[in-house]
């Protein structure tokens, strides 16, 4: 059993781990598969099984390894192949059907199957580099080039279930350094780095630690908030699934700084793979003597337990999260007292987010000044963002603060599919706002995003194109926040309900213009009067859309027109008699039996029967494309 | 039921904060929170049934109905919603003949929605028995369910 009783031991273990890591790339062919939830949903497991199967009869020595998410989720499943004496090549879109070609060309063949290569995975530990080939380095890939990867440094590179891989890449060296540093000095270093809470609110981390350090009490709790509740965010999931030890190391450093002996990771139950990998990482860290009593001979005792969140968005709020750990309904409390003084079980408590912890070892190793040199204004360092929606290259990225939305969408994300126009971008999820295309030069930092009425939030970024109806979008977010409102304070409980009612009225075409001013008044009341962050930010999607897209609201109200053809009550489907070839597929598929038509006769939709489900559009053969949608007023079609 | 709850409690560090882990334990063995379980947990922890019920209904993870043999969860996160999650749900709801939050009369399938599965780059997604499927069209989703039904 490897167990480090002090930092000298740890270095010995690291040297062994490093040697095994280096050997991985020099002995036999190595095949790595990206196996985070995103990769697995794209059939990564079946892909890896198919590769094993293809190779099984051939007496070809190969090693297999799983890695986390590199972030190029759009091209999943991702497979890297490292043949002896050759650089490691990353291939995209390797679904099980592609495996025979991959094995033939990239694994058994002599060349590198350049046509399907996304790039060469250049690592300091691999001596064969991209320079030897005509395939560019993966780090020069347009999606990766503008990135600075600190929190994501190991994601997609190491096996997340191997502590040795983490150690080989320098893991837990920051912990060893921190343990021989005074807690106050660590707090100063973190303050100097300018690191702010990555969960959304952006409170300076070092300052938060200082409050808890100074709080009276022998028992202090340290909580990692991994309850990523923003629908549209997956940064924390990717970090936990791709590099769980980076979070544990960050927690250990924080525990030393604030003087905590008990850590809790509060992770949502919807992330089974993250929970499983965290559990493995915790057991490994205990076995290696990195958790438990007298860690690395420093005299520090600290252990971490996992609490499964049961699914409540409001638990992102610190006091609600603690109520949930205590076994109650997750309802927030008024502050003061602040958690730093009286938090979990009324003991001093410090809560940070997954990403905040994942940044810490780099800050301790390279210094607060180094971290502070990245970023802009009062927003220092990098931010991980999940890029999704109407964008060509969806995935997980980490960019320096201050990069513009335009660079993210067009350089990193590759623009909008089908060359449609970008309508805007949603940042901060249901607590954030919708920033219109005219403001795409806004830098991504806490202050600039607030200036346009949105927030950084946890880092979800959803791109919308002209096919998205702004009113429907605001209604969607309000449906979410209204449902997730815990019901404790009146402005949030009743205000979100009333706002939702008005938005629904608009999408049905039953509102008048006075509803818009009512909506705005209500939104401001909810924002100013709510007890916690959920209520005070819930109006953001409404306020920003009213500010930037008011004409679209007016179009719904005055002309009953949904320009994006999304709002069902304002949209009708009809069949263009000139294009219809009377194949009858739509009539067969229509669940409402609203489509009629004889052989060789254009078909017709009975508007009274139509439930506007859209099945007809999806089944109408593309070469005919006879079914269209219209909004404004109902189409009357004569038979 | 009470014996079961006591056994679950044994594995926990104590009664403090045990309510949610107990509910989670019941759900993972039984598949849902039954009326019996609510009563038994209240009895074991020495709290009222209404308190147990209040917590069970607060969190979206807890199911108060018996799930089907196969559990279908359609993601309605922002990205999935914008990319057709709602159509996916409507299609499945129609083909299974149940609204979300119900189980088919033969007990084969239950249909639920989930706030986000964190696979936004592969929207729209659904999870069937914990396996996530991405980039789905309503027809593909229906086919996955039909395959299971064979």
Image (cartoon, grey):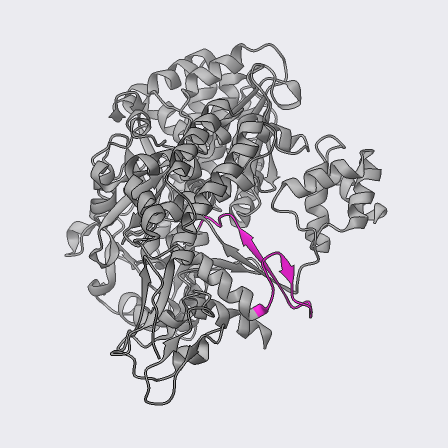
The dominant secondary structure in magenta is loop
| Residue stretch in magenta | B96-118
Q: Residue at x 80, y 33 (%)?
A: B47
Measured as percent of width and height from the top left, residue A550 is found at 30, 39
Relative side of A483 to A550, left or right: right
Determine the image quadrant of residue A453: top left
Measured as percent of width and height from the top left, residue A97 is found at 36, 72
**Closer to us: A40 or A521:** A521
Quadrant into which the C terminus of chain A falls: bottom left
Determine the image quadrant of residue A548: top left
Q: Is residue B109 magenta?
A: yes
**Closer to us: A130 or B69:** B69
From this view, report whether residue A281 is shown above or below residue A360.
below
Whether residue A575 is visible = yes
Relative side of A140 to A526, left or right: left
Q: Is residue A623 magenta?
A: no
**Closer to us: A261 or B121:** B121
From this view, report whether residue A44 is shown above or below residue A381.
below
Residue that protrudes farthest toward the bottom in the picture:
A599
């Amino acid at each position: 059993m490897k167990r480090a009783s002090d930092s000298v031991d740890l270095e010995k273990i690291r040297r062994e781990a490093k040697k095994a890591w280096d050997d991985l790339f020099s002995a036999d062919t190595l095949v790595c598969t990206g196996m985070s939830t995103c990769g697995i949903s794209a059939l990564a497991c079946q892909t890896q099984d198919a590769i094993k199967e293809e190779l099984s009869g051939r007496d070809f020595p190969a090693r297999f390894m799983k890695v986390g998410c590199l972030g190029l989720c759009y091209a999943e499943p991702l497979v890297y192949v490292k043949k002896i004496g050759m650089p490691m090549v990353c291939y995209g879109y390797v679904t099980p059907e592609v495996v025979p070609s991959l094995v033939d060309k990239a694994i058994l063949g002599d060349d590198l199957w350049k046509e399907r290569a996304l790039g060469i995975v250049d690592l300091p530990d691999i001596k064969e580099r991209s320079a030897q080939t005509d395939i560019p380095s993966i780090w020069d890939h347009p999606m990766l080039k503008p990135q600075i990867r600190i929190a994501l440094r190991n994601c997609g590179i190491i096996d997340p279930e191997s502590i040795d891989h983490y150690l080989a890449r320098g893991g837990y060296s920051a912990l060893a350094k921190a343990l021989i540093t005074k807690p106050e000095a660590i707090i100063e270093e973190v303050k100097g780095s300018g690191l702010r809470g990555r969960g959304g609110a952006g409170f300076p981390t070092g300052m938060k630690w200082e409050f808890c350090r100074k709080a009276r009490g022998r028992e202090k709790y340290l909580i990692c908030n991994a309850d990523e509740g923003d629908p549209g965010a997956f940064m924390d999931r990717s970090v936990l699934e791709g590099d769980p030890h980076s979070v544990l190391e960050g927690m250990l450093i924080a525990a030393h700084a604030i003087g905590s002996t008990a850590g809790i990771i509060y992770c949502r139950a919807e992330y089974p793979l993250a929970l499983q990998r965290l559990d493995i990482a915790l057991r490994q860290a205990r076995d290696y003597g990195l958790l438990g009593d007298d860690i690395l001979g420093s005299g520090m005792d600290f252990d971490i337990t996992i609490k499964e969140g049961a699914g409540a968005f409001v638990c992102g709020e610190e006091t609600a999260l603690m109520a949930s750990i205590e076994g109650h309904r997750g309802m927030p409390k008024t502050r003061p007292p602040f958690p730093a003084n009286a938090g979990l079980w009324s003991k001093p408590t410090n809560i940070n987010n997954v990403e905040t912890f994942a940044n810490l070892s780099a800050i301790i190793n390279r210094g607060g000044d180094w971290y502070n040199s990245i970023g802009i204004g009062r927003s220092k360092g990098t931010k991980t963002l999940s890029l999704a929606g109407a964008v060509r290259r969806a995935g997980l990225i980490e960019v320096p603060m201050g990069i513009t939305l335009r660079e993210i969408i067009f350089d990193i994300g590759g623009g909008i599919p089908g060359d449609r126009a970008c309508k805007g971008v949603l940042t901060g999820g249901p607590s954030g706002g919708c920033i219109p295309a005219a403001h795409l030069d806004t830098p991504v930092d806490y202050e600039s995003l607030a200036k346009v009425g949105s927030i950084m939030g946890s880092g979800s970024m959803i791109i919308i194109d002209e096919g998205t109806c702004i009113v429907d979008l605001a209604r969607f977010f309000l449906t979410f926040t209204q449902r997730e409102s815990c019901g404790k304070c009146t402005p949030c409980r009743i205000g979100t309900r009333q706002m939702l009612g008005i938005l629904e009225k608009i999408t049905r075409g039953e509102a008048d213009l006075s509803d818009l001013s009512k909506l705005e008044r209500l939104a401001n009341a909810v924002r100013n009067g709510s007890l916690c962050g959920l209520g005070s930010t819930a109006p953001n999607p409404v306020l920003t859309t009213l500010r930037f897209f008011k004409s679209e609201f007016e179009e719904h109200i005055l002309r009953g027109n949904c320009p994006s053809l999304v709002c069902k009550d304002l949209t009708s489907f009809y069949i263009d008699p000139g294009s219809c070839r009377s194949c009858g597929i739509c009539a067969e598929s229509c669940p409402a039996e609203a489509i009629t038509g004889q052989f060789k006769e254009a078909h017709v939709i009975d508007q009274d029967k139509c439930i506007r489900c859209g099945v007809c559009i999806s089944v109408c053969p593309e070469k005919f494309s006879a079914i269209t949608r219209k909004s404004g007023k109902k189409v009357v079609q004569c038979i | 039921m009470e014996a079961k709850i006591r056994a679950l409690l044994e594995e926990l560090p104590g009664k403090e904060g045990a309510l949610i882990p107990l509910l989670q334990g019941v759900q993972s063995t039984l598949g849902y929170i039954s009326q019996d379980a609510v009563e038994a947990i209240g009895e074991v922890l020495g709290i009222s049934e209404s308190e147990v019920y209040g917590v069970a209904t607060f969190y979206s993870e807890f199911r108060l109905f018996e799930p089907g043999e196969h559990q279908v969860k359609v993601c309605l996160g922002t990205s999935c919603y914008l990319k057709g999650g709602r159509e996916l749900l409507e299609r499945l709801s129609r083909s299974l003949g149940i609204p979300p939050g119900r189980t088919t009369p033969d007990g084969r399938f239950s249909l639920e929605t989930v706030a986000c599965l964190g696979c936004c780059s592969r929207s729209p997604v659904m999870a069937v028995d914990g396996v996530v499927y991405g980039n789905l069209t309503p027809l593909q989703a229906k086919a996955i369910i039909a395959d299971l039904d064979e």
